[in-house]
Amino acid sequence: MKQRSPVAVLLLPFVTLGIYSWYWAVKTKGEMNNQGQSIPTAWIWLIPFVGMIWWCWEYSKGVENVTHEKLSGVLAFILIWLLGFIGQAIIQDYFNKVVEGADKNVAPAYVPEQPTTPVN
């Protein structure tokens, strides 16, 4: 997942009249799908009401898997559905924490042990 500023995710929809909110959802969906999720295409949004609800639910399940259940799918759905881009900023914060955690868990490069001299 790409690290993004949660503040930018919160404020850019105001500047772009909501377009960034859609852009963010599609980009993060693609990033989650690259990690093995199966979130459907955003074109499903064109089906009135039901398409958007179903897509948000599938997206929320992907969020739960990508964040290793640190953010539940139900809570992610509520954040997206009820809070919109405010919820997106909160979810982006969880994505950033996953990326930061992955960076910390990287195994150090192999360093062979130095031979020691026996002590008598």
Image: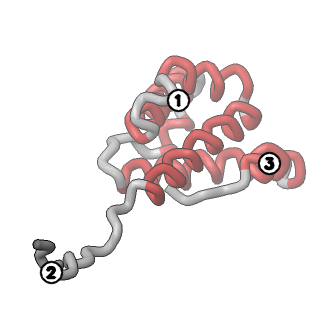
Residue sitting nearer the eye, 51 or 19:
19
- Element assignment for label 2: loop
**Disc on res. 117:** 2
Mark 2 or 3: in front is 2
| CA separation in Å, label 1 and label 2 | 63 Å
Residue positioned 44% across, 45% down in the render:
41
Q: Amino acid at mark 1?
A: Cys
Colour scheme in the image?
secondary structure
What element does badge 1 sit on?
Answer: helix
Alpha carbon of mark 1 to alpha carbon of mark 3: how far?
22 Å
Q: Residue at x 50, y 53 (%)?
A: 99
Which mark is in front, 1 or 3?
Answer: 3
Which residue matches tag 3?
A: 7
- Residue 34 is drawn in which quadrant? bottom left
Pointer 3: residues within 10 angstroms few (<14), some, or many (20+)?
Answer: few
N-terminal label among 1 and 3: 3
What residue appears at the point 55 percent right and 55 percent down from the top-left corner? 27
Q: Which residue is mark 1?
A: 56
Residue pushed farthest front? 120
| Residue at figure coordinates x 56%, y 26% from the top left | 76
Q: CA distance from mark 2 to mark 3?
A: 56 Å
Q: Position of residue 13 (x, y in %)?
A: 81, 47
Q: Amino acid at mark 3?
A: Val
Q: Position of residue 109 (x, y in %)?
A: 31, 74
Q: In the rendered structure, which amino acid carries the disc numbered 2?
A: Thr
Position of the C terminus by quadrant: bottom left
